[in-house]
Amino acid sequence: MNDILFSTGAIGPLKLRNRIIRAAAFEGMCPGGVPSPSLVKYHRSVAAGGVGMTSVAYVAVVDGGRTFRHQAWMDPRLVPDFRKVTDAVHREGAAVSVQLGHAGNMSDRKVSGERAVAPSGRFNLFGLALPRRMGEAEIERMVEAHGRAVSTAREAGFDAVEIHAGHGYLISQFLSPHTNRRKDRYGGSLENRARFMREVLRAVKKAAGNSMAVVVKTNLEDGFRGGMTADEGVEVARILEAEGADALVLSGGFVSITPFFMMRGTTPHRELIRAQKSPLIKLGMMAFSRIMVKEYPWQEGFFLDGAKRVRAAVKLPLVYLGGIVRKSKIDEALGAGFDFVAMARNLVAEPDFVEKIRRDPSHVSPCLACGPCNSCVAVMYDGECRCTWWERQGKPKA
Ligand SMILES: Cc1cc2nc3c(=O)[nH]c(=O)nc-3n(C[C@H](O)[C@H](O)[C@H](O)COP(=O)(O)O)c2cc1C
């Protein structure tokens, strides 16, 4: 087959067997913060299903950067547990990356016992948290923590790290004028707001050395007035290229304000309220979620136009992400100059989607028929990574 899709591709020192990446989408499979056999099984199934690389999602760089109890941090004591994931994926012939970040004002004190930190002490209504503003010494320690986490990931056998600089988590909170009200060298101009990200990337590159790929997930835009704009998103991509990132994954949205901007489709209010563990937040959601959580219509390849602006501005490898349900759209993205295509929900519904389109190029993901209903986002809170809608249609569990 002569498709670009099934040709090998490179991200820095890493060679992938094809152009498909399983996007970081939280699996919820680290009960008590420890990677479980389900996490190994899940990523093995995605690797066996044909992706070039799968990504273990949402691992924090320090204990205090976690949002969920069933979320891991890159604790050196967990190297043998993460090693089980990386070995299993490698045995299936795929590469594996780990998404590393810090939730900032989305960190949950009940998980780590530490108060959330952020660029500025601005109330986060979504998490009902008043974070503590980070001092300069603390910023320096946080930069070092990112480097340490990458060294640990390397020891655990990950081929790549994906630094989370989007979606309204800590780096993104520094980038966004909404959450960054600082008057020092970390706030104000975009140059200053990007300083923390640049320092993190330098520490990460140093720790990654020559053998590991460094990918950054970044926002095209935050998706609300007062957040990071699309023009700034292009500038951020330029900064990341200048700092030596090996590839960028382009996304958008801010979990505390525009959580469904990055996904689109139906907002599963009822399921999200049911899944919420905190009684206070549950009550708040029952009262306000339909007013506060904006719904965005889904469209195939919904980030393609915005991502093309970045494609025109930088030369480094870019990963397209958002609204892929069939091979023809993957081909379109690769034809438009994107080097890789990442997918989240269709690989939740069908871990073997890549094999399916290899056998039958007209195969369409069930995500098209489900809406997408985004029920997979709600079940993630229960520590599961599956499409309940697809199962209700009588299809086998992934
Ligand atoms: C259940 C679920 C969990 C997700 N968790 C994460 C995450 O941990 N980190 C992240 O960067 N994006 C996360 N995302 C967003 C996806 O990576 C992706 O940006 C989004 O789903 C759009 O891609 P898609 O249309 O291929 O699903 C998640 C998405 C879903 C559906």
Image: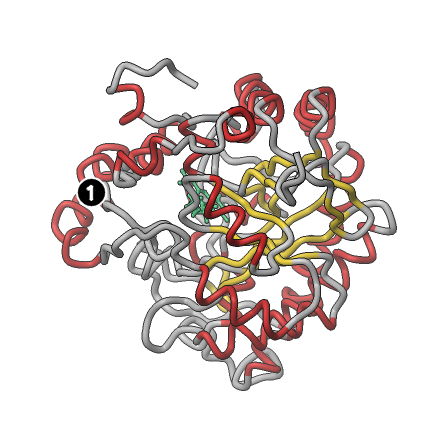
The kind of secondary structure element at disc 1 is: helix
Residue 154 placed where, x, y %? 78, 40
Total labels: the figure holds 1
Q: Looking at the image, which is closer to me, 100 or 353?
A: 353
Residue 385 x %, y %: 43, 28
* Residue 223 on image: x %, y %: 36, 67
Is residue 128 something that shows in the picture? yes
Q: Is residue 335 left or right of residue 267?
A: right
Quadrant of the snapshot with the C terminus:
top left
The quarter of the rendering in which ligand 1 is drawn is top left
**On screen, 81 above or below 60?**
above
| Rendered residue at 23%/55% (across/down) | 295
Of residues 119 and 86, the one nearer the viewer is: 86
Residue 98 shows up from this direction: no
Residue reaching furthest to the left: 287
Q: Residues within 10 Å of mark 1 (few under 14, many from 20)?
A: some
Colouring scheme applied when the structure was drawn: secondary structure
Residue in view at x 72 percent, y 53 percent: 214
Residue at 59% from the left image edge and 72% from the top image edge: 312
Quarter of the figure that contains the N terminus: top right
Question: In this rendering, would 53 be left or right of 31?
Answer: right
- Which residue matches tag 1? 269
